Amino acid sequence: MKRVARFLALAFCMQATVALADLIDINRASKRDLESLPGIGRVTAQKIIEHRPYRRVDELLGIGRFGRSRLDRIRALITVGDLSRLPAPRREIVEEEAPALGPPEGMVAITSWTTGEVFYVEEGTTEGFCPYTGVRWKLSGGGE
């Protein structure tokens, strides 16, 4: 009986070792390798490649429409590999905005709620077209 238990334990360890070797490293995998994962098509595979490097598998959640259910389906099949070989994390350049000077004389500032861009119209204007979206706007309820 002990022999059977040892054999089963050894077999389980060997399967676990083989399974680890078959994991797909999302930091180094080819597009074809990524497409072999369930629920990953060519577009998602390309997005995964474009957002490298990853330090944790959960970072895939920040890519487009990559949701928790898709990640749960592939979590057991992927890894981020050896983190010591990854380059330093990407640094984003943050641009500071120039201080607001306010609207020109006789004008009123309006902020587009769809784009967040500010545009100016003459005081007293109650409707017009947004220059960024082309959408017609109309002031309502005594706002500026």
Image: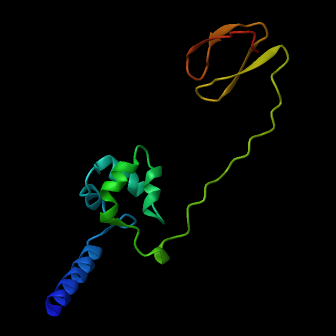
Furthest-front residue in view? 1
Q: In screen coordinates, is 132 left or right of 19?
A: right
Q: State the residue in front, 77 or 10.
A: 10
Query: In this rendering, does residue 29 appear at all?
Result: no
Residue 6: x, y in percent?
Answer: 20, 90
Residue 48: x, y in percent?
Answer: 39, 55
Give the mark count: 0
Furthest-right residue in view? 105
Indicate the colouring scheme.
rainbow
Residue 19: x, y in percent?
Answer: 25, 73
The residue drawn where x is 83% and y is 30% is 101
Query: In this rendering, does residue 138 appear at all?
Result: yes
The quadrant in which the N terminus is found is: bottom left
Q: State the residue in front, 27 or 120.
A: 27
The residue drawn where x is 43% and y is 55% is 60
The residue drawn where x is 28% and y is 49% is 41
The residue drawn where x is 25% and y is 82% is 13
Asked if 37 appears above or below 95 in the picture, the reply is below
**Within the image, what quadrant is residue 129 found in?**
top right
Q: In screen coordinates, is 77 left or right of 11?
A: right
The quadrant in which the C terminus is found is: top right
Asked if 69 appears above or below 82 in the picture, the reply is above
Furthest-bottom residue in view? 3
Asked if 133 appears above or below 136 in the picture, the reply is below
Residue 12: x, y in percent?
Answer: 22, 80
**Within the image, what quadrant is residue 33 found in?**
bottom left
